Amino acid sequence: MRVKINRNVCDAQLAFCEQCLGKFLREPMGYERHCFEELEDDGQEALTIELISNDHTTTLVLNPEERQRAAIEGWSFFVDFIPPMYRGEDAA
């Protein structure tokens, strides 16, 4: 499955965003949010997430084990930038 998520369209704080994506990671075929710009079943076992947050765009490819880990720990542990707590805010 492949999903494109644009955090810039939601003004929820980071902790809520991570819980929201965690819900999707646990139940991908029954959960979709307005920040999801694209969602497609590409036939792959791995989940590909294109994530946009402020000026950062990153792609995560998560196998089933990594998907469960991200659902628990949050997606911010998997990116190479420090996401801001609130949309439009620069990370310190």
Image (tube, rainbow, N blue to C red):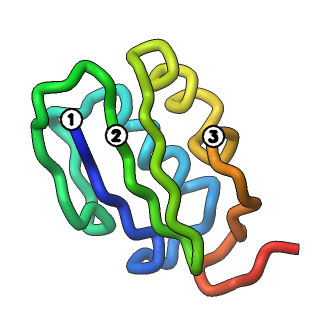
Q: Residues within 10 Å of mark 3 (few under 14, many from 20)?
A: some
Which residue bears the numbered disc 3?
Answer: 78
Considering the numbered disc 1 on the image, is that residue within a helix, a strand or a loop?
loop
In the visual, does 33 lie left or right of 81? left
Q: Examine the rendered structure and indicate whether residue 88 appears above or below residue 70.
A: below
User: Between marks 3 and 1, how big is the CA–CA gap?
Assistant: 18 Å
| Residue 92 percent across, percent down from the top left | 89, 74
Q: Amino acid at mark 3?
A: Phe
Total numbered badges shown on the rendered structure: 3
Q: Residue at x 57, y 78 (%)?
A: 54
Residue at the disc numbered 2: 48
Question: For residue 91, what is the image quadrant?
Answer: bottom right
Residue under pointer 1 = 1
**CA neighbours of label 2 inside 10 A, class few (<14), some (14 to 19), many (20+):** some
Name the image quarter holding the N terminus: top left
Q: Are marks 2 and 3 in contact (CB under 8 Å)?
A: no
- Do the residues under discs 3 and 1 have CB atoms within 8 angstroms? no
Q: What is the secondary structure assignment of the residue under circle 2?
A: strand
Tell me the quarter of the picture where residue 69 sits. top right
N-term mark: 3 or 1: 1
* Mark found first going from the N terminus, 2 or 3: 2
Assign a secondary structure to mark 3.
helix
Q: Is residue 78 left or right of residue 19?
A: right
Marks 2 & 1, CB-CB < 8 Å contact:
yes
Query: Amino acid type of disc 2?
Result: Thr
